[in-house]
């Protein structure tokens, strides 16, 4: 006898994480290269003595703190085991098998996988020629079955960002029963004042009677806690409540909760790091352009090289130079901005690419 698993899952590709190769520079997962702050390590170490106890499943302190920081009632904040898990909770909260999710493509690799795991239908909307989200095409892709639209801003892996006015115009045209999720995993790296803070934008929409807007944020990128898994969603009270219903109990662990709080305490210090990464991003992009690469303007902690069929060769070439990038074969390579010397190693590799 063989256990019968869902036939529809056999065709589903697995999530491909960025590779970690001993001795190589990893610029494949959009992590912050600098290690956790000493104050954060201390908080984690102190909390380690109590791991015989279950965590606070409601993450009460963290949710209250986030509510204060964002200026929303705590009831409108829902935490998750990384924002990727919240993406799944959002699909679970809105969709059955009869419903559909719309998202841009190429975008965050987890969207199609999560949607398929939940069993909902999906529509992938191609990016514009400029590698940005095509909001008009996304609007046109919405049908009466569409319950959720992911808007990744800035977009992973292209780094392009939508401006306030275009997002507002989009939301105003989306049917009121369809949820728009602004996935802001890279928000802290944005330096264009026309790219909105999604939570502020959402608040204005809620005040205008549109409760179909939610925002996703994470501690994995700018806050440097990728290994601990904690993110959050901000939405209407009803949506946040439904997200809590589909939450796997205790999945945001105790160390993640204290580390997130300690990181909020150290926010100023962490944002200084982010600004240094933004400065490096400008340098790396300028040098890549000078070397003849096409590099879309990026608002995230990575650059996108739309190399098409040359992507696989570029990936190999970087690996030979002990630099691990994230290749989407046939499409392009995404390269995280690391410390200056890591970026130099990558640039040296890129300049010698002749493929
Ligand atoms: C990295 C990323 C996330 C999720 O990060 P978590 O580590 O699960 O919090 C979500 N959305 C996008 C677009 C990302 O790039």
Image (cartoon, rainbow, N blue to C red):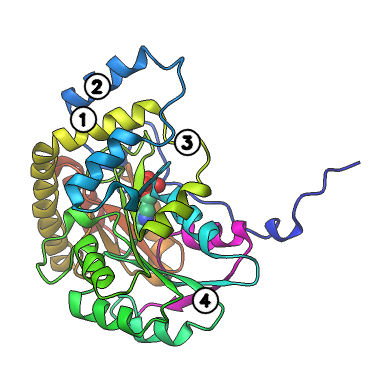
Pointer 2 local density, CA inside 10 Å: few below 14, some 14–19, many at least 20: some
Q: Quadrant of the N terminus?
A: top right
Q: Residue placed at 8% from the left, 43% from the top?
A: 272
In magenta, the rendered stretch is 106-127
> Label 2 to label 3, Cα distance in Å?
19 Å
- Which secondary structure, mark 1? helix
204 lies left or right of 209:
left
- Which secondary structure, mark 2? helix
Sequence-first tag of 1 and 3: 3
Provide the residue designation for mark 2. 43
Residue 146: mark: 4
**To which quarter of the image does residue 352 belong?**
bottom left
Ligand 1 has an atom within 8 Å of the beta carbon of the residue at disc 4: no
Q: Residue placed at 40% from the left, 54% from the top?
A: 240
> Label 4 to label 2, Cα distance in Å?
43 Å
Provide the residue designation for mark 3. 251
Sequence-first tag of 2 and 1: 2
Circles 2 and 1: CB atoms closer than 8 Å: yes
């Amino acid at each position: 006898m063989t256990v019968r698993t869902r036939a529809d899952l056999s065709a589903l590709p697995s999530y491909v994480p960025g590779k970690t190769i001993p001795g190589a520079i990893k610029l494949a997962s959009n992590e912050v290269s600098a290690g956790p702050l000493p104050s954060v390590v201390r908080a984690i170490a102190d909390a380690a003595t109590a791991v015989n106890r279950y965590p606070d499943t409601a993450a009460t302190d963290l949710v209250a703190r986030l509510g204060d920081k964002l200026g929303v009632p705590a009831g409108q904040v829902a935490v998750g085991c990384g924002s990727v898990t919240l993406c799944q909770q959002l699909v679970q909260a809105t969709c059955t098998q009869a419903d559909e999710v719309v998202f841009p493509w190429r975008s965050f690799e987890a969207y199609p996988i999560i949607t398929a795991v939940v069993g909902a239908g999906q529509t992938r909307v191609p990016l514009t020629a400029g590698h940005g989200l095509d909001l008009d095409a996304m609007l046109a892709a919405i049908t009466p079955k569409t319950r959720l639209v992911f808007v990744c801003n800035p977009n992973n892996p292209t780094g392009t960002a939508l401006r306030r006015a275009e997002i507002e115009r989009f939301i105003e045209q989306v049917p009121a029963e369809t949820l728009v999720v602004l996935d802001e995993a890279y928000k802290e790296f944005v330096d264009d004042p026309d790219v909105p803070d999604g939570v502020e934008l959402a608040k204005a929409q809620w005040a205008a009677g549109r409760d179909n807007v939610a925002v996703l944020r994470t501690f994995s990128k700018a806050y440097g806690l990728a290994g601990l898994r904690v993110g959050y969603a901000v939405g209407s009270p009803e949506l946040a409540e439904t997200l809590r219903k589909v939450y796997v109990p205790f999945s945001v662990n105790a160390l993640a909760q204290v580390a997130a709080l300690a990181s909020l305490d150290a926010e100023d210090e962490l944002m200084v790091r982010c600004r240094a990464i933004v400065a490096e991003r400008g340098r790396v992009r300028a040098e890549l352009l000078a070397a003849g690469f096409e590099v879309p303007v990026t608002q995230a902690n990575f650059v996108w090289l739309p190399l098409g069929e040359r992507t696989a060769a570029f990936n190999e070439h970087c690996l030979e130079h002990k630099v691990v990038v994230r290749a989407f074969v046939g499409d392009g390579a995404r390269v995280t901005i690391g410390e200056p010397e890591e970026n130099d190693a990558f640039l040296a590799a890129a300049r010698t690419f002749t493929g």
